[in-house]
Image: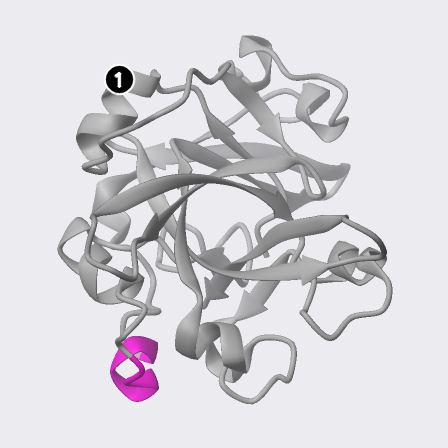
Amino acid sequence: MCGRFTLTTSADELAESFDLLKMPSIEPRYNIAPTQKVAGVLQDAKGAGRGFQWFHWGLIPSWATDPAIGNRMINARAETIIEKPAFRNAFKRRRCLVLADGFYEWRKLAKGKQPVYIRMADAKPFAFAALWEHWNGPGDSAIDSCTLITTTPNERIEPIHDRMPVILAPKNYDRWLDPKNEDVAALQKLLVAYPAKGMTVYPVGKRVNAPTFDDPACIRALEKTGE
């Protein structure tokens, strides 16, 4: 699964990397957790280019009666995404990117779990493959929410966890975002593990275990594991 990630890249660099005409000012985030807001990208259905969008992390299906259902839908498995009622319509029509520059996973050790930080080898920002939904609640309440898609891990992540988030190659952004593209078979082929050689993994302190901590210390490398 993917339960924590970071986005510390400047707004200007994100706008350039993801071809965004407008990008709000954003604060660096070192420990983004489920139910918090995440930075996303959508493709305009009328061909006006890519747009920035804030999403609630935890997908709330349009048919849900209680938005708390989103707390259980932070991830969607690539292998079953076209079968699950909560995800299949969004996979066909409501795909987005969620912006990040690293994510966390927890390695099982004899003395507990060791958090590790995973990022691109060049430290550049990247995009998770994600789905989104618009939920209309009572009165005027409405929530745009999302879920991150996971797949089987590459050889670098496999010793740590049996799942990893799908990180899309930039060449596939347009195909993924195109709301008119309903070729689910071709889209599902994009949901594979990012090449291991392009990623860096290192252990970090247990500060990241608590979502209340959100500072540069969360991604500081440890010299020894288990600290």
124 displayed left or right of 166 = left
Secondary structure type for disc 1: helix
Q: Please provide percent x and percent y for residue 49.
A: 21, 48
**Residue placed at 13% from the left, 55% from the top?**
171
Q: In which quarter of the image is the C terminus?
A: top right
Nearest the eye: 180 or 220:
180
Q: What stretch is highlighted in magenta?
A: 182-188
64 displayed left or right of 120 = right
The chief SS type of the magenta part is helix
Q: Please provide percent x and percent y for residue 205.
A: 63, 20
Q: Would you say residue 106 is visible in this rendering? A: yes
Does 30 lie within the magenta span? no
Q: Please provide percent x and percent y for residue 79.
A: 48, 81
Answer above or below: position of 173 versus 56: below
Nearest the eye: 172 or 112:
172
Q: Characterize the local packing of mark 1: few (<14), some (14-19) or many (20 or more) Cα atoms within 10 angstroms.
A: some
5 displayed left or right of 182 = right
Answer above or below: position of 88 versus 130: below
Amino acid at dot 1: Asp
- Residue labelled with disc 1: 12
Q: Would you say residue 123 is visible in this rendering? A: no
Tell me where residue 218 sits by quadrant. top right
